Amino acid sequence: MNETHIVTIERHIIEEERRRGASGSFSDILTDMAFAAKVISRQVNMAGLVDILGGTGTRNVQGEAVQKLDVFAQDVIYRAMDHGGRLCCMASEEFEEYIPIPDKFPAGDYVLVFDPLDGSSNIDLNVSIGTIFALYRKVSDAERGSLEDCLQPGLQQLAAGYVVYGSSTMMVYSAGRGVHGFTLDPSIGEFILSHPDIRIPDPPVRSYSVNEAYFDRWSPAMQRFMTDLKSGDASWSGGYSARYIGSLVSDFHRTLLQGGLFMYPADGKSPKGKLRLVYEANPLAFIAEQAGGAAIDGVQRILERTPEGLHERTPLFIGSSTLVEAVGSYLGSEG
């Protein structure tokens, strides 16, 4: 890479700020998130060498076993964000209630929602994991935020992004002007622009991501769609094969770069879906649409839904627009 053309994530955020006419606080929040990602990445990469693998012996509000790295990532993000006077509150997958900024620190006009370490059940298996986040502007009159501020429709997101901790660490974000990816260069400790203006390919590579072990639990319409996806004769169907990691961030990241379709349908045991609308579906849907893709819950556009609770769950179908529209036509026919 020609060093004279290196663009760091901090530089990119500042340039985006100038184009948007955004406040310095908005940019500072994204920069702080990039810093937190570096700290988490360092610890993830050292996990096999330090006493941070395995569970804590407790469960979070979702009923899931809490991993030591979950706790570490939660703490890093919270402490990177709690004191700068930019946020009024935060909400995390790991906490039952929203988190007001402590009284000892100044409060700002923005709200951060995040999943500190998505896919943490894969930590001990050395499978890629990630962080997901989204940023909103405060809409309530409460100085330190309220539940109302955290339950805004995804359309109100000002920015969203994710970090994937894999063979390299990559941060992908959108502030409403396209999607851009940055790879962490450990030699200089900076996220460098490596994937400018990402667009989801359409037509995509002929692959999909879903846990087919649940096929028998799916609705007849979902089962028909899967059959046609693999062997149908429609213009969009036939010949698709599975590429499934089982880590949401990793599966979505591949779909974003190569196209295709990621699916987590409702089923007989989870009729309302499994993924979290606030912390997972909304941020990724924002990124997908900014990259020219689409995201639905089977019938409704994800970004148009107003969450009823912090930990509300949803089905998710996300990826290349052609395929999202196709699965929507099948599931919509169920009435």
Image (tube, rainbow, N blue to C red):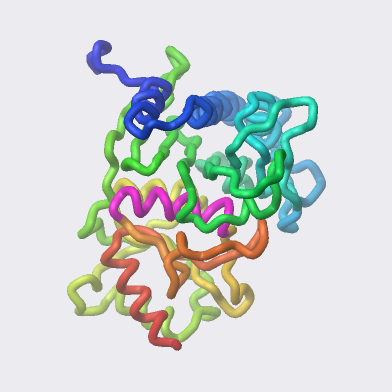
Q: Residue at x 25, y 79 (%)?
A: 232
Q: Is 330 situated above or below 27?
A: below
Instruction: Indicate the quadrant where residue 173 lies.
Output: top left
Would residue 278 be counted in the magenta stretch?
A: yes
> Where the C terminus falls, by quadrant?
bottom left
Residue 78 vertical position relative to residue 213 in the rendered view, above or below: above
Taking the image as shown, residue 137 lies to the left or right of residue 97, namely left
x, y percent for residue 273 = 57, 69
Q: Residue at x 30, y 78 (%)?
A: 228
Residue nearer the viewer, 273 or 64: 273
Q: Magenta segment, which residues?
A: 277-292
Horizontal and vertical percent for residue 146?
70, 49
Q: Main secondary structure of the magenta part?
A: helix
Where residue 207 appears, x then y in whole percent? 31, 60
Q: Residue at x 34, y 67 (%)?
A: 324
Looking at the image, residue 83 sits to the left or right of residue 237; the answer is right
Query: Is 222 situated above or below 142?
Result: below
